Amino acid sequence: MTKVFIVSFHVTALENSIMPSDIGGAYVSCYSKGETYVEATENALKKLAVDGLHPEEILQPIHEMSSSAWTEHVKEQWADYVNNLPSQAEFEEAISSGEVVYSPFGSYNPQ
């Protein structure tokens, strides 16, 4: 069992971003392991930077869950996206290797 923190962000695109240029911004939850929420948040911030996403805001609260609870969590939180998210095994492998897993992005148009 690995401790996973769920850190949600409001993000906007930087120059070389995974986010399409016609999107104004998005909300996303990052699933990151860490001994503390601070460590997990730092890991998530590094992943956002690599993917060309600028964190406008870290949203509260930060939640904690066991990596073994992924399948149930997805069914409760992201039922419409089950087929687009990692399986339990994929999630646990990603988390145990230090990767950050994104939730579906909730995007909005530029103003």
Image (cartoon, grey):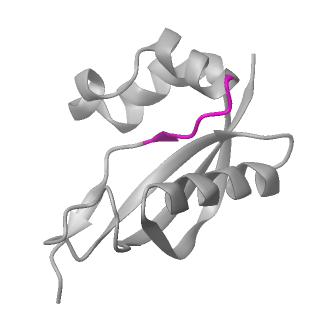
Residue placed most toward the observer, 14 or 44:
14
Residue bounds of the magenta highlight: 97-102
Q: On the picture, is 65 further left or further right than 56?
A: right
Above or below residue 29? Residue 97 is: above
Pick out the residue farthest to the top: 89
Q: On the picture, is 71 further left or further right than 109?
A: right
Residue placed most toward the observer, 77 or 26:
26
At a point 25% along the width and 32% down the height, the residue shown is 81
Q: Main secondary structure of the magenta part?
A: loop
Q: Position of residue 10 (x, y in %)?
A: 44, 70
Residue placed most toward the observer, 63 or 92:
92
Q: Position of residue 78 (x, y in %)?
A: 33, 36
In magenta segment, residue 101? yes
Viewport quadrant of the N terminus? top right
Q: On the picture, is 63 further left or further right than 106?
A: right
At a point 62% along the width and 16% down the height, the residue shown is 68
Q: Position of residue 43 (x, y in %)?
A: 68, 50
Pick out the residue farthest to the right: 35
Above or below residue 51? Residue 24 is: below
Above or below residue 103? Residue 89 is: above
Q: On the picture, is 29 further left or further right than 97?
A: left
Viewport quadrant of the C terminus? bottom left
Q: Position of residue 58 (x, y in %)?
A: 58, 70
At a point 44% along the width and 55% down the height, the residue shown is 51
At a point 26% along the width and 28% down the height, the residue shown is 84
Pick out the residue farthest to the bottom: 111
Residue placed most toward the observer, 88 or 49:
49
- Indicate the quadrant where residue 95 lies: top right
Total numbered circles: 0
